[in-house]
Image (spheres, rainbow, N blue to C red):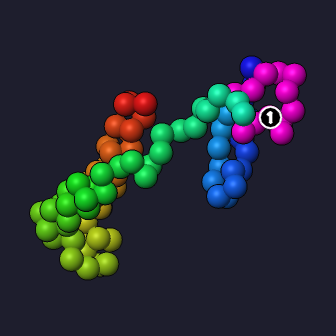
C-alpha cells in the first residue's frame, strides 16, 4: 500500500492509501487516510477560551499583544490544545 495525496471535486486536499500497483486515478477509491478535520473543532468553546484569556492577560491592543509574549503564547496554546485533542481522538 502507498499513500497518495489528491484533490477532490471541492478543491480540498485528500490522502488515501491505494495498492502499490494502482495509479493516481484510483486515489478517490482508496482507503481514506486524511488528518483530523479541523472543521470539527468546537469553535465557540475555542473562541470563548481565547476571549477569556485576552482579558486575563490584558491583551486589548496590538501593542499589548507584542509586549506580553506569555499572554500571546497562552492564546496560541488554546488552539494547539484543541488541535492536539483532534489528533488524540482520531
Tag 1 residue? 26
What stretch of residues is rendered in magenta?
17-28
Q: Which residue corresponds to the image point at 29% horizontal and 70% vertical from the top-left?
A: 65
Question: Compared with residue 68, is residue 28 higher up or lower down, i.e. above or below?
Answer: above
Left or right side of 55 for 22: right
The spot of residue 71 in percent (x, y) is 24, 60
Question: Compared with residue 44, is residue 84 higher up or lower down, i.e. above or below?
Answer: above
* Nearest to the observer: residue 27 or residue 41: 27
Numbered disc 1: secondary structure: helix
Q: Which residue corresponds to the image point at 73% horizontal and 45% vertical from the top-left?
A: 6
Packing grade of label 1 (10 A; few <14, some 14-19, many >=20) is few
Left or right side of 63 for 23: right
The spot of residue 27 in percent (x, y) is 75, 36
Visible residue check, residue 68 = yes
Question: Compared with residue 16, is residue 14 higher up or lower down, i.e. above or below?
Answer: below
Left or right side of 5 for 59: left
Q: Residue furthest left?
A: 56
Q: Which residue corresponds to the image point at 39% horizontal and 38% vertical from the top-left?
A: 86
Question: Compared with residue 76, is residue 65 higher up or lower down, i.e. above or below?
Answer: below
Q: Which residue corresponds to the image point at 33% horizontal and 45% vertical from the top-left?
A: 82
Q: Is residue 20 magenta?
A: yes
Q: Quadrant of the C terminus?
A: top left
Q: Quadrant of the N terminus?
A: top right
Visible residue check, residue 70 = no
Amino acid at each position: 500500500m502507498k499513500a497518495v495525496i489528491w484533490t477532490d471535486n471541492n478543491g480540498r486536499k485528500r490522502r488515501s492509501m491505494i495498492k502499490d500497483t494502482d495509479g493516481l486515478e484510483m486515489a478517490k477509491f482508496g482507503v481514506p487516510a486524511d488528518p483530523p478535520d479541523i472543521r470539527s473543532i468546537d469553535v465557540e468553546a475555542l473562541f470563548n477560551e481565547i476571549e477569556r484569556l485576552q482579558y486575563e492577560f490584558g491583551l486589548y491592543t496590538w501593542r499589548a499583544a507584542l509586549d506580553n509574549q506569555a499572554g500571546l503564547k497562552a492564546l496560541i496554546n488554546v488552539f494547539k490544545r484543541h488541535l492536539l485533542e483532534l489528533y488524540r481522538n482520531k
